[in-house]
Amino acid sequence: MDFSAYLTMGVVVAVLAALAFTRLAADVILLSAMVILLVSGILTPSEALAGFANTGVITIAVLYVVATGLKETGAVQWIANRLLGQPRNVRQAQLRLLAPASGLSAFMNNTTVVAMFIPAVQEWAGKLRLPPSKLLLPLSYAAIVGGTCTLIGTSTNLVVDGLLQSRKDVSLHMFELAWVGVPLVIVGGAFLYFFADKLLPDRESVLEQFGSAREYAVEVDVDPRGPLVKQTIASAGLRSLQHGYLTDIERDGQLMAGVPPETQLQAGDTLMFIGAPECGRELRRIRGLIPAEGDVHKLDIDHHKRQLVEAVIGPDFAGLNQSVRESRFRSRYQAVILSISRNGERLPGKVGDIELEVGDTLLLETGQDFVDQYRYRRDFLLVSALQDSTPPDFKRAPWAVGILIAMVTTAAVGLLSILQAAFLAAAAMLLVRCMPYSKARRSIDISVLTVIAASFALGAAMTKTGAAEQVANWLLFADDMAPWVGLALVYVLTVIFTELLSNNAAAVLMFPISVSVAEQLDVSFMPFVIAIMFAASASFMTPIGYQTNLMVMGPGGYRLSDYVRLGGPLSVLMGATVLGIVPLVWGF
């Protein structure tokens, strides 16, 4: 190796160390590495920036918009609520959960699937009186494995496909990976079904462990045209909310207190809930509930542009020691007070009659620009938006699902490329107003795309300088090594990288190494490339290896030992399955 190869390997080692042992953002680290390779002359500008024009990276960016359309319409939650059902025990619940989670993840970003399933599973677990810790980690694992079944199921598959197109002029088909992905779903699902209940703890979520600091009262009405009319409180899922509980029902001017779960809901019922601020967000995602009659309906803001905000009244607030009605709060701030908390406890009575004091915490329904407008004003000491509190537009959910099906179908039959189909699907989501244009722009995660695109520069430098060939030489420690042993070594090294790095960065780094190993063994490179696609997604042993693992950590109350206990055996089982099937399908 010459100096450029040593420098490239030094940069790669430095990137690994920085990602593993520092708190620097991953996009900063990878961009810095790309700049070093560019300035040192190892890569030309076109080589260093090639990742930003890669078809796989662009496809991932466009699919963010498609996934947002599904999320904003509540389509995933709508599907989940109909598939989960009423199981009798933990095992049946896990079985009901694994199939839809893995199935949906095959056709849309698994991060979006898990984000939409978490509140649904928490509510479902509460209704069934099951610990969410028995369900949420299997949800993450099922989404990860399900994403390996198709080319669009995970960004890793799209990234490696982009590398194959640019480096080897090979393009994978939509369902080509299903030869391995479907057996992985079956084997992984069976393992989780038989062992997850035994290996996972019975533990509360972080929120349940620490309790709620602020308590509010929130009122909603039963939509006369919605699906909750004639349903019981229990069957509607209103007895087992994660962040609040139903206290009273007002019907025809009469107050019903302490209502039993078998009480049937009627059109126009006003329901009173008490709980944390997130209770308001939960209620907004239940189809058939609408804000109670009042100032909310006078708010001159489109329904899909609203959000929930917490605001703490400051000493310069104009309406101090006045009632909410006297302060003209709605017309002054273009916001409606849903509930008021003082010293961490809700204030009873009608909101309009409550006199406002310094330090009162308000739960508001308002526009999406409220936080930016009042964050630095002295009217409020603190202004904070509740994440994902915009009400889903359930009426457009069938449109969103139809667009997704059309995108998958046109790409699967070869009518359009995946990139073309994704662009048309994103455009269709915007045209039928599954989401506003502003949310479509914000949905594209620039930091993730930057990490992926910048990591392409590392892979290109590894190939250009011969560093990848040298690493392949170190892996092939014996001259007469069998191809399947080399395949196993590549797989294991990729798994180690993906637990330390992001799954996409691990795949990009291992791509040139896997190709060099295949060349030195004088066999086809395809089994090795396919193996790193699956290995890069096989992150089960740490919460940081895959984003969905980190997402369920708090809601499930998990610790690192929980991931190792369940994910370790699952990683071994997945590896054995991949290494057994890949050579049979693609051949050496």
Image (tube, rainbow, N blue to C red):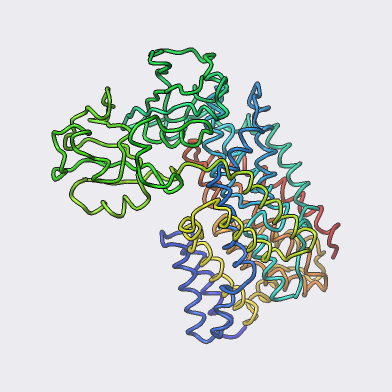
The answer to which of 159 and 472 lies nearer the viewer is: 159
- Who's the residue at 36% across and 45% down the image? 300
Residue 73 position, x and y percent, is 55, 45
Quadrant where the C terminus sits is bottom right
- Who's the residue at 65% across and 62% down the image? 424
In this picture, residue 124 sits left or right of residue 204: right
**Quarter of the rendering containing residue 215:** top left
- Who's the residue at 23% across and 54% down the image? 376
Compared with residue 547, is residue 136 higher up or lower down, i.e. above or below?
A: above
Compared with residue 427, is residue 70 higher up or lower down, i.e. above or below?
A: above
The answer to which of 319 and 161 lies nearer the viewer is: 319
In this picture, residue 35 sits left or right of residue 272: right
Residue 208 position, x and y percent, is 42, 30
Residue 309 position, x and y percent, is 34, 43
- Who's the residue at 43% across and 62% down the image? 25
In this picture, residue 266 sits left or right of residue 306: right
